Amino acid sequence: MRPKEREFLSIWLLLLALGLFGVSALAVRRMDVRGLPENVSRELTAQEQAEIIARNSPLTEYVRLSPNVTFPREDAVKKITVHHMADDISLERLGEVFAEEDRRASANYAIDIEGRVALYAEECNRAWTSSSPENDHQAVTIEVANDEIGGDWHVGDASYATLVELCTDICQRNGIEQLVYTGDELGNLTIHKMFNEETECPGPYLEGKMPELAREVNQRLAEMAGNKGGGGGG
Ligand SMILES: [Zn+2]
């Protein structure tokens, strides 16, 4: 080949290589998008929400699924991890926040200051909540709204009462016989700060309630097991 022809050939080869790179990059991007279920990020109809609630906690009143989730989780549900919102925003607003992909955050459930429950990641999937993939692959994570911003990050009685109910329901449906709070990550009731030194989440108030939460949930689980096995009688 003459030098001029060689130059043309190398330009064409370069263009071809760039084209192939572009096509494969697009294909990878397309696969990413396709890898997400079609029902994430967007608002859902009442019918769609009802179908999703049927697979999760019946206490749920609002569903908006986050894309910031690993589908499906890699482990069975064995734990519950409690967080606080560090805010008192509505379930709908939190749904908008978790719907943004660049937030890289989500939770399975949240409870607002009135004690209403929302679902953002189905229980069969791993929410990105606790700074620990290992924990979150095994845990259902719950964000609880604060009625005091700062200080002890207090949580209202209505929210706490729902937390007891929701934890009981999660344990019952997932075959968790009892909740054990050890104050470290060895128990199956965990809190965010066990996995991240930079957070105080779920705040002093909720952290102080953890032994009581485990006790109340276990009492309810024992009562339910007794009712099932005892066949009445007292
Ligand atoms: Zn947290």
Image (cartoon, helix red, strand yellow):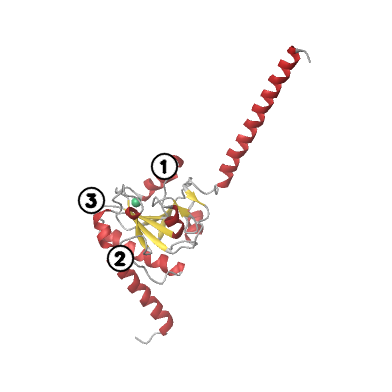
Q: Which residue is mark 1?
A: 103
Q: Residue at x 74, y 12 (%)?
A: 4
Horizontal arrangement in the rendering, residue 228 relative to residue 206 (left or right): right
Three-letter amino acid code at disc 3?
Glu
Q: Which residue is mark 2?
A: 213
- Mark 1, Cα crowd under 10 Å, few <14 / some 14-19 / many 20+, is few
Q: Earlier in the sequence, mark 1 or mark 2?
A: 1
Q: On the image, which quarter does residue 10 sit in?
A: top right
Where is residue 207? Give x, y as percent.
Answer: 27, 58
* Placement of 223 over or under 106, stated as above or below: below
Quadrant occupied by the C terminus: bottom left
Where is residue 198? Give x, y as percent.
Answer: 31, 47
Residue extending furthest right? Answer: 1
Q: State whether residue 44 appears in this view.
A: no
Task: Answer yes or no: disc 3 within 8 Å of ligand 1.
Answer: no
Q: Which residue is mark 3?
A: 148
Three-letter amino acid code at disc 1?
Arg
- SS for dot 3: loop
* Placement of 191 over or under 234, stated as above or below: above
Q: Are marks 1 and 2 in contact (CB under 8 Å)?
A: no
Task: Single out the mark in the foreground, 3 or 1.
Answer: 1
Q: Earlier in the sequence, mark 3 or mark 1?
A: 1
Marks 3 and 2, how far apart at CA: 20 Å
